[in-house]
Amino acid sequence: QVQLVESGGGLVQAGGSLRLSCAASGRTFSSYGMGWFRQAPGKEREFVGVINWSGGSTYYADSVKGRFTIARDNAKNTVYLQMNSLKPEDTAVYYCAAKHYTDTLYIYWGQGTQVTVSS
């Protein structure tokens, strides 16, 4: 069982930056790939990016590539989403999720944190 808690959301002006954190419980955090997703009002949840269990590999959606960076600290059971050059269209609830390295499905989800980017 893995519990995920996101933090770091808030209100920021366009062009600004935020760093989201996702703290995980459990002793097997390093066995999980960690993904970030977001959902804007009236829209479906969309993939933002993912980092593999070791932190050695990342992949991003085209909409955030070059602006967002995912990192993890397995010693702290935490994954981060650094968001730079924020745009109003980045406004959404951001979720972190975990999938075991042997699986393709995200089975653990956090409660989400709101990010609002004003123009």
Image (cartoon, grey):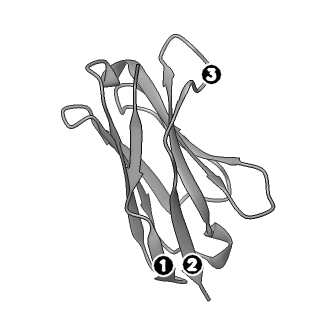
Mark 2: few, some, or many residues within 10 Å (few <14, many ≥20)?
A: many
Quick check: 98 above or below 1? below
Amino acid type, label 2: Val
Mark 1: few, some, or many residues within 10 Å (few <14, many ≥20)?
A: few
Most extreme residue toward the top is: 102
Q: Earlier in the sequence, mark 2 or mark 3?
A: 3
Q: Earlier in the sequence, mark 3 or mark 1?
A: 1
The answer to whether 43 appears left or right of 55 in the picture is right
Which element is circle 3 on? loop
Q: Which quadrant of the figure has residue 116? A: bottom right
Q: Earlier in the sequence, mark 2 or mark 1?
A: 1
Q: Which residue is mark 2?
A: 117
User: What x and y, as percent, mark residue 35?
Assistant: 52, 38
Measure the alpha-carbon separation of dots 2 and 3.
30 Å
Amino acid type, label 1: Leu
* Depth order, front residue of 80/59: 80
Quick check: 115 above or below 33? below
The answer to whether 79 appears left or right of 46 in the picture is left
Q: Are marks 2 and 1 in contact (CB under 8 Å)?
A: yes
User: What x and y, as percent, mark residue 15?
Assistant: 51, 82
Q: Which image quadrant: the N terminus?
A: top left
Q: Which quadrant of the figure has residue 63? A: bottom right
Quick check: 78 above or below 9? above
Residue shown at 20%/37% (left/top)?
A: 76
Measure the alpha-carbon separation of dots 2 and 1.
6 Å
Amino acid type, label 3: Leu
Q: Which image quadrant: the C terminus?
A: bottom right
Q: Which residue is mark 1?
A: 11
Q: Which quadrant of the figure has residue 105? A: top right
Residue shown at 51%/46% (left/top)?
A: 111
Q: Which residue is mark 3?
A: 105
User: What x and y, as percent, mark residue 109?
Assistant: 53, 36
